[in-house]
């Protein structure tokens, strides 16, 4: 209960700030003359501003399913499924789909913050849990926690799974882990690792395999279903290839980091990567092995797609990094991070609303 109260105020404040910045951006500034992906899907300015880039794919899947657009096969099903269910309840209009996506993202974010603060409080003081939630909220790419993207849902499910595993509540841990695996390709299934480690520490190898199985089965099951839908056993890899990304050696993407045709803001991308990477390394000192292992694997997945153009968004999923930050950044250091992160976040929110690529 304390965790919910402690994160509610920063959650509400940042939701209001995000909405104001997005509205101001679309009102005061001109958008590109040619929309890169989706042009004005709604006459409602907030819903319109929340639906950029990959958001169109999730809405299209929610509305039309898989198979029609091969590139959309790279997106996992849980988030668009929830959008479809909620949009149907809302009446099924175009705006209903967009409103459903925004609502799911923001409710999931609140749940994620509560779980994060509660997870930190298991081993540390409650104030550290509140700081971790705040530091996640002001991370520069936090705009993706508010718009029609599955980041908030993935984080809520992943943190929730680990939290229940720490409490020895294996049924909800397994269920949330399986749902996380259906939310984002490969990063979602990575939650099987901390569940397995926690189960092994308690009860041995058999328990570890049982804890990891639901997420693994969910991932494999979806790949099989997608194969049946598309007729392509490598449908996800094929779709990712259409986007110019795919599995690669970690850090290979750094080779074209300073190519202006690829990266508009290379120093931001490099800075975020070094920052999160340092926190991942520190996680082995400050956090449990299960959390450090999870942070390491998700970080490596984030930089092993052949491109770092989306990595700053993926880093939101490395939630143990924000736990470490809450332990090492206090007082003026913490205030400096909040000020700098919030400033960049405001800029990135405006850029996202204006169709500029952020992550």
Image (cartoon, rainbow, N blue to C red):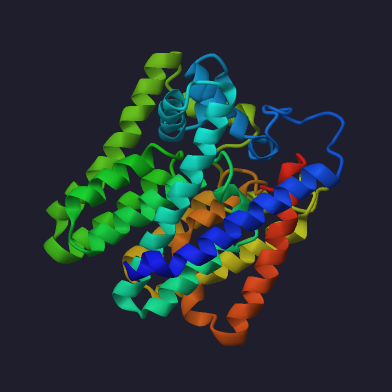
Horizontal and vertical percent for residue 194?
31, 58
Find residue 179 and report its image quarter: top left
Which percent across, then down, holds residue 251?
61, 54
Q: In the displayed structure, does residue 323 sit left or right of residue 290? A: right
Left or right of residue 294: residue 101: right
Instruction: Name the residue nearer the viewer: 55 or 95.
Output: 95
In this orientation, which residue lies closer to the viewer: 318 or 340?
A: 340
Question: Which residue is most to the bottom?
Answer: 331
Residue displayed at 13% across by 52% down: 206
Q: Residue visible at 34% across and 67% down?
A: 118
Residue 270 in the image: above or below residue 101: below
Q: In this view of the protein, can residue 293 be seen by the observer? A: no
Image side of residue 241 versus residue 89, left or right: right
Q: Is residue 230 visible?
A: yes
Residue at x 49% of width, y 54% of height: 317
Image point (40%, 67%), residue name: 5
Q: Relative to 285, is 202 above or below?
A: above
| Residue 212 point in image, percent of width and height | 25, 48
């Amino acid at each position: 209960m304390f965790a919910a109260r402690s994160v509610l105020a920063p959650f509400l404040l940042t939701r209001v700030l995000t909405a104001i910045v997005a509205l101001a951006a679309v009102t005061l500034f001109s958008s590109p003359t040619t929309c890169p992906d989706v042009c004005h899907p709604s006459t409602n300015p907030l819903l319109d501003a929340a639906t950029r880039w990959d958001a169109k794919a999730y809405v299209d899947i929610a509305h039309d399913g898989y198979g029609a657009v091969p590139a959309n096969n790279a997106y996992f099903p849980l988030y668009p499924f929830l959008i479809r269910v909620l949009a149907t309840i809302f009446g099924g209009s175009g705006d209903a789909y967009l409103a459903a996506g925004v609502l799911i993202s923001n409710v999931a974010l609140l749940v994620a913050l509560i779980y994060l603060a509660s997870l930190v409080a298991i081993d540390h003081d409650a104030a550290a849990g509140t700081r971790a939630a705040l530091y996640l909220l002001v991370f520069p790419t936090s705009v993706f926690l508010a718009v029609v993207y599955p980041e908030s849902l993935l984080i809520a499910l992943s943190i929730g799974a680990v939290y229940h595993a720490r409490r020895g509540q294996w049924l909800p841990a397994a269920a949330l882990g399986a749902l996380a695996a259906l939310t984002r390709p490969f990063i979602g299934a990575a939650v099987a690792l901390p569940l397995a480690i926690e189960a092994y520490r308690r009860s041995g190898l058999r328990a570890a395999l049982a804890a990891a199985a639901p997420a693994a089965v969910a991932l494999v099951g979806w790949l099989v279903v997608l194969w049946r839908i598309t007729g392509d056993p490598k449908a996800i890899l094929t779709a990712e290839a259409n986007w110019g990304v795919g599995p690669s050696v970690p850090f290979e993407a750094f080779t074209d980091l300073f190519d202006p045709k690829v990266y508009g803001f290379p120093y931001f991308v490099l800075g975020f990567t070094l920052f999160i990477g340092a926190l991942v390394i520190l996680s082995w000192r400050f956090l449990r092995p299960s959390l450090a292992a999870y942070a390491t694997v998700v970080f490596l997945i984030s930089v092993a797609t052949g491109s770092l153009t989306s990595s700053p968004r993926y880093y939101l999923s490395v939630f143990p990094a924000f736990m470490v930050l809450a332990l090492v950044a206090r007082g003026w250091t913490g205030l400096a991070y909040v000020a700098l992160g919030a400033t960049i976040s405001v800029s990135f929110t405006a850029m996202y609303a204006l169709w500029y690529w952020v992550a």
